Image: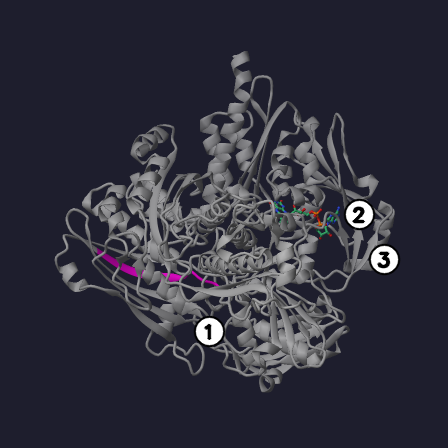
Amino acid sequence: MANWVGQAWDRIEDLRLLTGRGRFVADLTAPGLVSVAFVRSPHAHAAINRVDLEPARRTPGVVAAFSGADLAPHIALGVTEQPPLALQAVHYVGEPVAVVVAEDRYAAEDGVEAVAVDWTPLPVVTDVRVALAEGAPTVVAGRPNLIAERRIGYGDVAAQFARAAVVVQERLVIHRATAQPLETRGVMAIPDPDGSGVTVWTTTQSPHELRRSLARSLRLSEDKVRVRTPDVGGSFGVKNRLYPEEVVVAWLAMRLVRPVRWIEDRLEHFAATQHEREQVHEVELAADAEGRLLALRDRFVVDNGAYVRGGVTVMQRTAMTIPGPYRLPALEAVGRLVRTHKTPIGPYRGAGRPQGCFVMERMMDRLAEAVGQDRAEVRRRNLIPPDAFPYATGIESPERVVYDSGDFPAVLEEALALAGWDQAAARIEAARQEGRWIGIGLAMNVEDTGGGGYEGARVRVDGNGEVTVYSGAVAQGQGHETAFAQVAAEVLDLPPERIRVALGDTDDIPLGIGTFGSRATTLAGNAVRESAIAVRRQIVEWAARLLEADPEDVVWEGGAAYVRGVPERRISLEAIAARANPLTPIPMGPEGPLPLGLEATTYFQSAPTYSSGCHACWVEVDPRTGQVRVLDYVVVHDCGRMLNPKLVEGQIYGGVLFGLSTVLLEELRYGEDGQLLTTTFLDYPLPTTTEMPPLRIAHRETPSPRNPLGIKGAGESGTIPALAALTAAVEDALKPFGVHLTELPLTPERLLQALAQSQSRP
Amino acid sequence: MFPAPFGYVRAESLDEALAVLAREGPGAKILAGGQSLLPMMKLRIAEPALLVDIHRLPALTGWQETAEGLTLGAVVRHSQLERAEALQEFYPLLGRTARWIADPLVRNRGTVAGSLAHADPAGDWGAALLALGASVTLRSLTRTRELPLDAFLVDIFTTALEPDEVLTAIRIPKPAGRPFGTYLKLERKVGDFAVVGVAVNVVLDARHTVVEAGIGLAGVGPRALRAPAAEAALIGHPLESGGIREAAALAAEAADPVSDRRGSRAYKRNVVRVFVERGLKALADESRPEVGVTA
Ligand SMILES: Cc1cc2nc3c(=O)[nH]c(=O)nc-3n(C[C@H](O)[C@H](O)[C@H](O)COP(=O)(O)OP(=O)(O)OC[C@H]3O[C@@H](n4cnc5c(N)ncnc54)[C@H](O)[C@@H]3O)c2cc1C
């Protein structure tokens, strides 16, 4: 076997993507294509008395216009909690209310401007405390404000607190933010000419889920809906699962018997694509006098926004992330998911885990302070030792959390060494002599990756010997084509350029879950391996037939087969493939038939694997303006065996910048009237390469025993500890002033306020 | 984010542009670099009936340096000033301001005059050109007038421009000594609009006394502001820490910011004080080697 797995290949897809040859939904077209624009709610909560679409229908270029009432009789409602177009009332600013179809997007927007909606504004709830209060207005009629309450934990928390020598408490607040992929969402639907079905090109992360949900919504059989994803420019979770616009556009195509396309603009994206992160935690941590953990108690509230999308997942992942790499004898995390008149939330990069990690790591820093120990030492004392795996944390629900492998002490020590932890005090003191305020922060995490079910891959060698890998784990820029090709190339012992990876067509493989939760490589990567092994076996069997040898004696090497000891007489993959995929009658020999085709589809199923890591970073704070500069950032990362270190590092770079951005830049803000105040990049700054701190990455590879490749996910671990690590570093820089940071984001002004409230001033 | 329908003409001469403006009335808008106008049109905040494109008019390109000062044509781009080494000796503030604006793409297209005409209170040029004591030339088909920039800038997104006028030139008087100038900008990320922008410019005579001082502020009022009391406090003295602190405090008083998502009134005012102090200190340091020679 060639050793392709583990090599730092350049990304196969980059030539296409970086030279402008990618094809995104907005690049696609079709004869007779019409464009769509949505009428969206300007109110956070209002009754819809009347939607007058006539002025829109009269607008030049407009083809048709429909309201929720027009749509409702034709589709199955209830596939999602949110109706595709609002019916009696709207529940957040940006909720789609009606749709205008026109010859182009210009005319469609003219039509949208002409639509008149008669509203009765209703009371608005933007604060979870208000939503939970006695006599609170009902956010969505007929549905409870408290969507779900989950108690996640184990052990005797009360008893542990009773014997604690130290208890630290904190109220931690994390703000609302969202992912902002470079490409917004987009959908193009093309009806079958006979009106019986539809092909939907969309930016989704989960094409098979979309096919099923669209089929249910449109009352079609699944095979009448084909979902395709072209190149997609980032997703990070926010393009996962069915959105209202996808139903509307698919229905329009069938109704109008014309191709229909909608490209989300950035204004829409801010209000119409899911948000996340917003949580408030009341935490208590108990420990003995030496700083050994006894128990953690957390009551937290998650602001879900108006409709249920992925809020429950977010809440659960937050709680399940809390124990991290530490032995925590008892945990009680009680989360409440609460409805407000804001954009619905759903998981994005980290999916609740950054908040869970923030809770634990902030409390570890508090504990260190309370017991008078070094922050690293407190962590060191509590780490799960490397010989304790498999390690059952004690969490049994919603799933049993049993860490598969890791070496947390080694991860910690390497990060400390790289960041210069032991010399930190001297370095900080030296900087202060120069009038500079610098600090160092530390955070560790363990992340469940690739959990939840299966992912599939189909490997096929066609009659000309072309090898193609298909999977439902579609790509949005991560590098799946490279990763999957590496696995297939290794198993099939072919040069990488012989492997084509084709993702994003539900007709290519019957089942798939999709790309999210750091799962694609772990699950689909192993499925590629299994399918490729099966195909290799078929190749060898056909080769044996052609060489008139026993399969046991056939050597498959470098894309050709020969009988052991007779390497001069080789037959190529092309020759084998032509025979295995015959299109003309071939006389059958006395041996009888062999199964036709060189092809296999497998689905790899697994319990989660657990990646781990430690972030350590240096920051400098300007105490007169509150500005923060990240001086140095260290990540020690263990995602098991690495398929391709370059891909892993790409994920870490992006992930760290995501986390940095959440801490320092991004915040979605709502007015008390439920207006979203941050709707452009002017008000919601995003980092660019200029904000990227110097980043140093070290890898440790503790293979996962849960899959043959030994790999774990790497998509989110750059982000998860970053919130805690950066906050800790800023707090450390301002330590002489006694500043305690408990609320994000760390805007310059918030830091100055914290300084003003502290006992000593700069 | 698609604009409402609009017409477009590319003017072949300044007179043609002026004639179209005179004929079409307030529905017509000058298009220069398009870096402010087009985003507003995409948001349908601006829905002009006709765009009159002047961005290639030869009469408005480039600049002239004379004994009286510098005259910038209306379509001089941010990036041209960023790179204009020849202007560094007498107008160092220009290049040091230009490089703070947006990103290279915007700087390659956006014009200095367009920025003034747009009159975004957070724009950087208003502050810098106030600090340089600039004036603007406004032309219509029938008249030409020259206004100090301070009189041109009226309010948020509002200037003294009449609908039939084009801003054709920006004049900056020649400094009466050795100029030192710099721009400080509090931005949340590189390329951001200013939370607070501070332009400081001082002209020193041979004895290192401040003979001219300009302090312009961005983001802390309904328009770019000058800080005249702070300027006056500097004049007639060498640049020293006592005077610098006093000027910084006076500049902070001249600021009139509002609380918004970028920060509270108190916060922004405090940043003005910190930045004026830091800016003037930096200029003092820059001028010091010469002080050493003559002292
Ligand atoms: C992403 C981005 C970031 C930015 N960041 C900054 C920043 O950090 N700092 C900053 O200062 N600016 C920033 N800008 C604005 C930028 O500087 C613009 O270039 C400038 O504000 C307008 O110049 P323009 O030539 O593009 O004018 P246009 O957009 O063409 O015109 C703007 C307005 O001025 C009028 N106008 C233009 N020229 C004339 C004239 N000669 N006579 C009469 N009226 C005229 C137009 O009719 C229009 O109303 C940014 C812009 C973008 C898109």
Q: Is mark 2 within 8 Å of ligand 1?
A: yes
Q: What residue is rendered at 67% in x and 48% in y?
A: A19
Q: Quadrant of the C terminus of chain A?
A: top left
Location of residue A45 in the rendering, given as x and y in whole percent from the top left corner: 50, 75
Location of residue B228 in the rendering, given as x and y in whole percent from the top left corner: 57, 37
What crowding class fits label 3: few (fewer than 14 Cα within 10 Å), some (14-19), or many (20 or more)?
A: few
Tally of marks:
3
Q: Is mark 1 within 8 Å of ligand 1?
A: no
Q: Residue extending furthest front?
A: A590
Location of residue A521 in the rendering, given as x and y in whole percent from the top left corner: 47, 56
> Which residue is tagged 1?
A307
> Which residue is tagged 3?
B23
Q: Nearer the viewer, residue B199 or A647?
A: A647
> Which residue is tagged 2?
B54
Alpha-carbon span between mark 3 and mark 1: 53 Å
Question: Which region shows up in magenta?
Answer: A274-285
Tell me the kind of residue under disc 1: Tyr
Location of residue B151 in the rendering, given as x and y in whole percent from the top left corner: 67, 44
Q: Chain of mark 1?
A: A
Q: Residue extending furthest top?
A: B294
